[in-house]
Image (cartoon, rainbow, N blue to C red):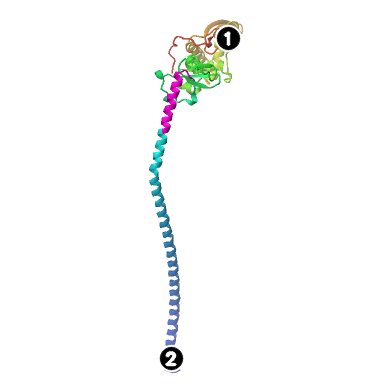
Amino acid sequence: MNATTEQSEPAGSTIETLIDELEALRKQLERLESGLERKDDRLDQLETELERTRTENARLEERVEELEEAQPPIEARLDAHEKKLNANKDRVGELQARELEKGAHLLEENVDESEIDVADGRLERVSKDDGQQYFRLPESDDPLERGGEIALAHSDLLPIQQLAKMDDDMLHATTSSLPSRLAAQLWKARTDPGVGDDPWQTGSKNVHEFVTASDMKHWIRRQERGISDDYAKKLVSRTIDALLDLSKNRLAITRKRQRKNGLEYTERRVLLMEDADIPGEGTGATTQDDPETGDVDR
């Protein structure tokens, strides 16, 4: 092999290498150009979305401006409506006050007591035999006789009756005295069949009902769980005192000799006499001016 042939072989190898590198560069350039085109397409897409967003924002801003411009008229209408309602409320209150002063009895649910302006500001809540409550001026008769006869006004009731109408929460809030609460519960047991635990017994002759001290003691222990027998005996005496006080002494106390297991003892009894003046019961159904009761824990 001559020298010329030896020199041409390296040159040929170099050219092939350069061709391969050039081909690789060309492919790399194609990939870069393809990637750039994809990025250009994505950029165009983002610009389109941005333009849509700007258009939507502009539309929303215009809507907000429209709503802001419309707000004052709406507020003005609401203010006018509120003034009209208040004016109508005042008119209704004035008409109701006039009717009450004429002797009308108005259903409690239709009257805003705080808005009624009557002489001395005195309104009385009464129950009627239709089972509903009404407002009236004290001791005024309804000329239209709506709702039937008046059952009893709250102010006509004895303190013991008023307390007996309260639920447990209201009773605890009204009086902190346990004997007063027990007296109210004992009275409620006598008048409300739904209570169930009723120690009162039917009397005879002139006695309408009565309860013995021993029965009262057992009843108290059922009401106040966990108290001792000795403490229950003390509560019996205090509860009897509360009964007398809260009933304005409409109850009577007697002592009766009893015999048990061969032993004789004297037991107190709380009596409700047939002629006792109890509002809503017996001969005491009519309201009378009673002397003021003693201090009641409230």
Q: Which residue is mark 1?
A: 208
Q: Is residue 23 visible?
A: yes
Of 134 and 97, nearer the camera is 97
Q: Characterize the local packing of mark 1: few (<14), some (14-19) or many (20 or more) Cα atoms within 10 angstroms.
A: some
**In x, y percent, where is residue 260?**
60, 8
196 displayed left or right of 179: right
- Specify the quadrant that holds the C terminus: top left
Query: The residue tagged with tag 1: helix, strand or loop?
Result: strand
- The range drawn in magenta is 84-104
Select label 1 or label 2 by which is in front.
1
**In x, y percent, where is residue 262?**
61, 6
Q: Characterize the local packing of mark 2: few (<14), some (14-19) or many (20 or more) Cα atoms within 10 angstroms.
A: few
Inspect the magenta stretch and tell me whether residue 88 lies in it.
yes
Inspect the magenta stretch and tell me whether residue 15 lies in it.
no
Could you tell me what secondary structure mostly forms the magenta stretch?
A: helix
Q: Which residue is mark 2?
A: 6
Of 45 and 192, nearer the camera is 45
- Give the residue displayed 44% in from the left and 88% down from the top: 9
Looking at the image, residue 74 lies above or below residue 52 = above
Looking at the image, residue 134 lies above or below residue 35 = above
